[in-house]
Image (tube, rainbow, N blue to C red):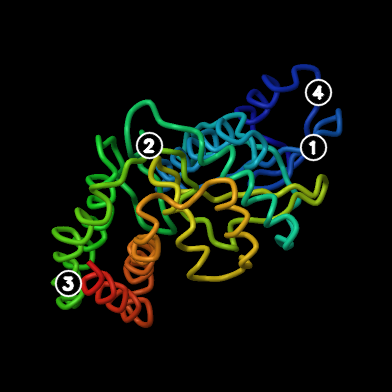
Amino acid sequence: MSLPSIILNELAKIEPSAEFTGRLGGRVESSSEKVYFVKLGTSDEVEQYLGEADSLKAINTGAPGLAPRVFATGTFENGRPFFISEYKDIRNLTEKSAVLLAKRLATEMHSYKSQFGFGFEVPTYCGATRMKNGWYDSWEKCYSEMIGDLLENLKKRGRYEKLCAKGKSITKDVIPKLLGPLQIEPVILHGDLWSGNVGVDSATGEPVIFDPSSFFGHNEADLAIARIFGGFSASFFAEYHKHLPKTKPESQYELRGHLYELFHYLNHTVIFEGGGYEFNALRKMDILIDGV
């Protein structure tokens, strides 16, 4: 399949003298033997693609090479979005590469700070859920808005009364008590850092993260979904906190973890319509309400 001129023009900006072969939505090889990936979306995914591309760029600014580098973004005349990035042949994360990932997260990515506050400059998507983002002057306000948006989404569906009622206690009481006193700075987060979004570059053996839903927030929030779905051993968390200690007060570390896991349980309730995720969200709320 021949590549459209809009893609060839963008590739020519990267390698002016090269020739390219490949396909949309897959690998593209250059005559210099470099390999690119052209990701292609549908016309209703323009915002989602921009958010993903900007997330990848921010991650690479903080930790060069930890995520695929984005070279170009654009939209076809028919409204379909695309972006061109490095192609990486990604394999499953090993325990050794997980420890290296933990170190890079702690020492590089989670050290890259925002100049504008907490949040992100464009909307992103955590799974199928749109995160409106924007900028906030405190982590408490930013996270309260994130939880509040999910609760409002569930409220509109008319069958999550108990979840939404307890959610009011979370936003009015729990979040101010747990997050309000924290002395932290906003650092770039992946936003959806579960085992399905991490791996190893087969060419280098280095860890890679992808499919982000980034924002600038509290570093500990990035560890939440890794705990929920597994795939990360105890050595991952130990290595991480060896380089980036738990935020004070350490006595509330576990409670903050429950609060950050709540976001993902609520989001999965939104995406998958309840089930076990609703039950776990209620369980987390009870722990938090009782704990503060």
- CA distance for labels 3 and 1: 53 Å
Label 3 sits on what residue type?
A: Lys
**Position in image of residue 77 (x %, y %):** 48, 33
**Position in image of residue 33 (x %, y %):** 86, 34
Residue contact between numbered discs 2 and 1, judged by CB atoms under 8 Å: no
- CA distance for labels 3 and 2: 29 Å
Vertically, is 190 above or below 235? Answer: above
Mark 4 / mark 3, whichever is N-terminal? 4
- CA distance for labels 2 and 1: 41 Å
Under circle 4, the secondary element is: loop
Mark 4 / mark 2, whichever is N-terminal? 4
Residue contact between numbered discs 3 and 2, judged by CB atoms under 8 Å: no
The residue at which mark 4 appears reads as: 18
| Label drawn at residue 166 | 3
Pick the residue in front: 3 or 160: 160
**Position in image of residue 265 (x %, y %):** 37, 69
Sort mark 1 into few (<14), some (14-19) or many (20+) by Cα contacts within 10 Å: some
Residue at the image position 51 percent from the left and 41 percent from the top: 110
Vertically, is 163 above or below 207? Answer: below
The C terminus sits in image quarter: bottom left
Under circle 3, the secondary element is: helix
Name the front one of labels 4 and 2: 2
Under circle 2, the secondary element is: loop
The residue at which mark 1 appears reads as: 29
Residue at the image position 33 percent from the left and 63 percent from the top: 259
The residue at which mark 2 appears reads as: 185
Vertically, is 187 above or below 264? Answer: above
